[in-house]
Amino acid sequence: MHLSRLTLNTANPAALHALADSYALHQLVLSAFPDREEGGPGRVLYRVEPDAMGRPPEVLVQSERKPGWQELERRALLAAECRMFSPRLQCGQRLRFRVRANPTLRCVFEPAPRPVPRRPGGNLTGESAYRVS
């Protein structure tokens, strides 16, 4: 697992846009990982650390694959540090998380069943069993 700390260049308009728009930040972070044709980014988690005492904001990125921050550094969007991360968790250990999630809801609407017309003798009609109104 890899852990990266990105320091965003707040003098760069693109970096400011990424801080203001969560989708732009998502695109910025994922741009450092392979495309789907090359295997995709794998699992990537990130969060923005609020700026403390006037320092530029930082983005912490945890990923399965090693990111390539060189292009973003070259475009003066950020400075990056990346290292291997191997957490050693123990049974009973307490962990704290800060999470921002975008919940989704999937609604499946089933059409109301229509009455099936019956022939006078009580049999279902073959092809006209489902009438289109």
Image (cartoon, rainbow, N blue to C red):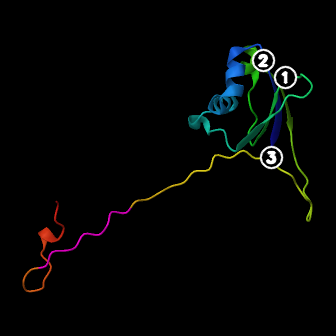
- Whole-percent x and y of residue 120? 7, 83
Horizontal side, residue 78 vs residue 41: left or right: right
| Residue at (12, 75) in percent of width and height | 125
Q: Which quadrant of the structure image shows residue 57?
A: top right
Q: How many marks?
A: 3
Dot 2: element: loop
Q: Amino acid at mark 3?
A: Arg
The reply to whether dot 2 and dot 1 touch (C-beta < 8 Å) is yes
For the residue pair 27 and 18, the one nearer the viewer reads as 18
- Give yes or no for residue 18 being in the magenta stretch: no
User: Of all residues shown, which one is farthest toward the left?
Assistant: 120
Dot 1: element: loop
Q: Amino acid at mark 1?
A: Pro
Residue at image mark 2: 10
| Residue at (78, 17) in percent of width and height | 10
Establish if 61 lies above or below 12: below
Residue at image mark 3: 98
Q: Earlier in the sequence, mark 3 or mark 1?
A: 1
Q: Spatial distance from mark 2 to mark 3, Cα to Cα?
A: 24 Å
Residue at image mark 1: 56
Horizontal side, residue 89 vs residue 21: left or right: right
Q: Which quadrant of the structure image shows residue 13?
A: top right
The reply to whether dot 2 and dot 3 touch (C-beta < 8 Å) is no
What segment carries the magenta color? 110-118
- Whole-percent x and y of residue 78? 78, 21
Establish if 82 lies above or below 104: above
Q: Spatial distance from mark 2 to mark 1, Cα to Cα?
A: 7 Å
Dot 3: element: loop
Quarter of the picture containing the N terminus is top right
Q: Amino acid at mark 2?
A: Thr
Q: Residues within 10 Å of mark 1 (few under 14, many from 20)?
A: some
